[in-house]
Image (tube, rainbow, N blue to C red):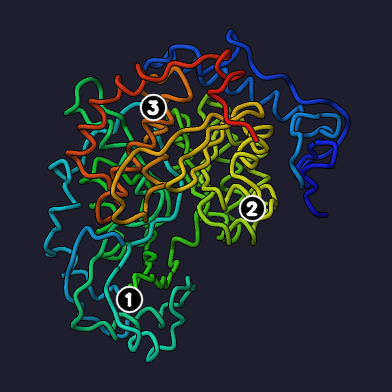
């Protein structure tokens, strides 16, 4: 069954996985009901209040989403890796496992891997976590190659392909003698590292406790991944899988700036609701689920259980859309989670349109508004054109923060970190959170690499009161020109 979004008269239909009986959408929240017009500071009582408001909204959304939305007429006129470490390769056909010693003694890149000089040793874990991420733990190997290299290995340029263990060893062996970089990579880790740096204790006040769960092997690459995140003040909590092989992504970039990605999932292809995940979810304020997990077999059960437990313990659930092709292949699974469990979703304009089954000609604001009928808080980025935040069928436009673009890779990850930071630090309005998120993204876009640098994070965090002070909105603004219209 296809997703019929809007009829000529402007009525909206629910996504195909949701059942249908008649009811209309609730009206836009007024000034007394909008959780974003309330002052929410970074403290447990106030954040709990914010979580309760969002849970009430979710209950309202689920009640509506499972009903027929055809009587609603609110939409007239709408149809239908980066480098943390570098070394020269010296591999055997066994692949990256033979790089254990190189990974331990590699030269650090000072321009991006400016860790907080945290001693990597066992410490007492905090009683609570502000954010816990559930995602793929993959080590990125990135290097420059020429077209001849790709042709020799019969690799199609500009594609993303899954490879097996033998293929990975063959590619890395072909790179023998080349200079390339290794990083604790992944979209989710980019967001978590940026968030931890924004919330660093050096800025003043309590630091944010940020952690990640997933699956790594007991090989040297698994230890490398855990250590790199720890140095960036992000704890990787999951125990390594005995005799497991940590997943990797080989990123081959040619002189025309095209990237070819070869992903070997390894143990990252198995993410279970294990003892570690079960113990940490009751202690977190926000659970962030990476969309790439939907690619993995049987992971939907883990995601569902994690989201249910998060809500049961008063946490918010945020989901990253991650990739258009991933949504295409797992559309029903995405909607099963975001339609029933997500409080927040992060997507770019293409991903948002795909979630709505919109054509490429539809505007991102149309997708933002539509998604906000099913998910309490929607964030949609549109590259240099800005971004949108959707609530209750309306959208706030966030202008782009000025910058000279250098590398757009990781911009969405950085935006999500700024948005989450705004929630955790007490942003009382949508515009303020969006402006802060846009500023964080612009800083990352203006540099080479996907990770927010420490000194930039400090400056951004210090400017946080400015972003809030300059953009106070309330429900009356939602009915005025603060809201973009179709």
Q: Residues within 10 Å of mark 2 (few under 14, many from 20)?
A: many
Q: Residue at x 80, y 36 (%)?
A: 10
Q: Residue at x 83, y 54 (%)?
A: 1
Q: Residue at x 20, y 32 (%)?
A: 459
- Label 3 residue SS: helix
* Foreground pick, 270 / 319: 319
Locate residue 373, reporting x and y percent. 68, 32
Q: Which residue is mark 3?
A: 422
Q: Callout 2: helix, strand or loop?
A: helix
- Which residue is label 2 attached to? 354
Asked if 292 appears above or below 259 in the picture, the reply is above
Residue that appears at 37% across and 60% down: 138
265 to 172, vertically: above or below: above
CB contact under 8 Å: marks 3 and 1: no
How far separated are the C-alphas under marks 3 and 1? Answer: 37 Å
Where residue 401 appears, as percent x and y from the top left, is 35, 38
Q: What is the distance, in whole Å, between disc 2 and disc 3 at their CAs?
A: 27 Å
> Mark 1 or mark 3, which is nearer the start of the sequence?
1
The C terminus, quarter of image? top right
Position in image of residue 465 (x %, y %): 30, 19
């Amino acid at each position: 069954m296809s997703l019929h979004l809007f009829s000529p008269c402007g009525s909206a239909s629910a996504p195909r996985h949701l059942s249908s009986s008649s009811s209309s959408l609730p009206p836009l929240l007024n000034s007394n009901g909008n959780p974003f017009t309330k002052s929410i500071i970074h403290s447990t009582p106030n954040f709990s209040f914010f979580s309760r408001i969002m849970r009430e909204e979710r209950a309202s959304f689920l009640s509506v989403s499972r009903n027929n939305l055809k009587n609603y007429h609110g939409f007239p006129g709408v149809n239908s890796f980066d480098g943390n470490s570098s070394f020269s390769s010296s591999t055997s056909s066994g692949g990256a496992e033979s790089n254990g010693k190189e990974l331990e003694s590699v030269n650090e890149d000072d321009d991006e891997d400016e860790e907080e000089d945290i001693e990597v040793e066992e410490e007492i874990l905090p009683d609570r976590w502000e954010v816990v991420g559930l995602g793929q733990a993959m080590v990125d190997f990135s290097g420059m190659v020429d077209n001849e290299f790709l042709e020799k290995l019969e690799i199609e340029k500009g594609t993303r392909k899954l490879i097996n263990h033998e293929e990975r060893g063959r590619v890395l062996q072909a790179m023998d003698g080349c200079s390339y970089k290794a990083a604790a990579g992944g979209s989710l880790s980019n967001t978590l590292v940026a968030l931890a740096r924004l919330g660093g204790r050096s800025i003043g006040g309590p630091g944010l406790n940020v952690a990640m769960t997933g699956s790594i092997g007991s090989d040297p690459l698994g230890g490398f991944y855990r250590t790199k995140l720890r140095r960036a003040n992000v704890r990787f909590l999951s125990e390594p899988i005995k005799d497991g092989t940590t997943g990797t992504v080989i990123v081959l970039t040619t002189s025309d700036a095209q990237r070819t990605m070869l992903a070997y999932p390894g143990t990252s292809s198995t993410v279970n609701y294990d003892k570690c995940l079960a113990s940490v979810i009751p202690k977190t304020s926000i659970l962030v689920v990476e969309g790439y997990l939907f690619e993995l077999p049987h992971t939907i059960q883990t995601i569902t259980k994690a989201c249910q437990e998060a809500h049961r313990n008063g946490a918010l659930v945020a989901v990253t859309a991650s990739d258009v092709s991933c949504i295409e292949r797992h559309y029903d699974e995405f909607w099963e989670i975001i339609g029933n469990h997500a409080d927040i979703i992060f997507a770019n304009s293409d991903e948002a349109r795909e979630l709505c089954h919109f054509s490429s000609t539809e505007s991102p604001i149309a997708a933002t508004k539509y998604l906000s009928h099913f998910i309490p808080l929607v964030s949609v980025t549109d590259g240099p054109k800005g971004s949108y935040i959707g609530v209750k069928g309306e959208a706030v436009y966030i202008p782009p923060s000025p910058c000279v673009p250098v590398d757009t890779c990781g911009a969405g990850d950085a935006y999500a970190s700024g948005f989450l930071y705004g929630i955790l630090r007490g942003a009382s309005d949508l515009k303020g959170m969006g402006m802060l998120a846009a500023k964080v993204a612009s800083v990352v876009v203006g540099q080479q690499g996907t990770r927010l640098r420490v000194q930039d994070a400090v400056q951004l965090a210090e400017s946080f009161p400015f972003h809030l002070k300059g953009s106070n909105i309330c429900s009356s603004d939602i009915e005025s020109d603060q809201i973009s219209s179709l």
